[in-house]
Structures are given as structure tokens and as C-alpha cells.
Amino acid sequence: MDYLLKTEPSVYSFADLQRDQTTIWDGVTNPVALKNLRAMQPGERLVIYHTGDEKSAVGTATVLSVDASDPKNPGVKIQAGKAVAKAVTLAEVKASKLFADSPLVRQGRLSVVPLSAAQYKFLTGE
């Protein structure tokens, strides 16, 4: 499974992740998003999505480890990947049939969204 992680770039941007190289993804409170975090496995691919004014997929990352011992605050360590060649906007996502049933479109406030391999490819070009 691949996932999309939403972040407000003024709080923690993809550039911050690239600078830090690794980080613990935290601050998630939505029960469904927490379930998605706990389900992650090392090696899974991630798309980093900027919320706010940008509303676009901007980069990639990889899950390094998952510590789900605290179900309310799972420790998911991620490693920066690379910036996508062209940021994919929310409008482009909504226009794609690939995302018709996606929580990315249906549950706009969900901060951790599962992606199919086809959706990952659409967002990253990989």
C-alpha cells in the first residue's frame, strides 16, 4: 500500500523533510488517519501533499519504521525522497477518474490517505 501524507507547508514542508532527511510523522488526531498510520509498513511509498494555499502533491518519501505501541500516537519514521517533476494540484486529482472513490476527494480533512499503485503513479510520475 502507498499513502499520501498531508502537511501545512508553513508548519512542516517537503523542503523541511528534505533538509532533515528523516522525521517522525506525528500530530495526527483523526481516528481514520491514525488507523492508516498504524497500518503502514517499512518500505512503503509516500506522497507528501501540501495543504493550505498550495493544495498539491509535491514530493515523495518512504516509511522507515513504525512503532504502533501507542495507538493514539504511532511513531512513523519517514525518509525524504525527491520532489515530483511537476506538482499535481487538487483540481487535477479531482478531475481524474482514478480518484473518484478516494478519501483524498471524499474526505478532504483526512491527513493520511491510502493510495493505489495507479494513484501513486499519477501523483509522482513514477
Image: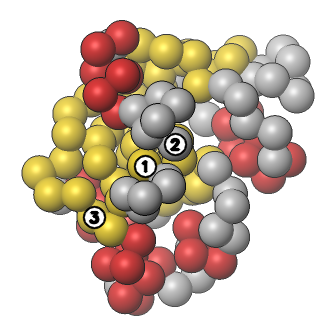
The answer to whether 57 appears left or right of 32 in the picture is: left
Give the Cα separation between the discs numbered 2 and 1. Answer: 6 Å
Q: Residues within 10 Å of mark 3 (few under 14, many from 20)?
A: many
Residue 90: where, in percent of width, then height?
41, 71
Q: Which is nearer the eye, 123 or 45? A: 123
Q: Which amino acid lies under the numbered mark 1 shown in the image of this protein? A: His
Identify which residue is drawn at 81% across, 23% down: 73
State the mark number for residue 8. Answer: 2
Q: Which amino acid lies under the numbered mark 2 shown in the image of this protein? A: Glu
The answer to whether 29 appears left or right of 90 in the picture is: right
Toward the left, the furthest residue is 85
Closer to the chain start, of discs 3 and 1, is 1
Q: Residues within 10 Å of mark 2 (few under 14, many from 20)?
A: some
Q: How is the image coloured?
A: secondary structure
State the mark number for residue 27. Answer: none
Identify which residue is drawn at 37% across, 79% down: 91
The answer to whether 41 appears left or right of 126 in the picture is: right
- Residue 98 appearing in the image: no
- Residue 5 appearing in the image: yes
Q: Which amino acid lies under the numbered mark 3 shown in the image of this protein? A: Val
Residue designated by label 3: 88
Residue 110: where, in percent of width, then height?
68, 57
Q: Is residue 53 above or below residue 36?
A: below
Q: Is residue 72 above or below residue 122?
A: above
Asked if labels 1 and 2 touch by Cβ distance under 8 angstroms, the answer is yes
Residue at disc 2, secondary structure:
loop
Give the Cα separation between the discs numbered 2 and 3. Answer: 16 Å
Q: Quadrant of residue 34?
A: top right
Residue designated by label 1: 50
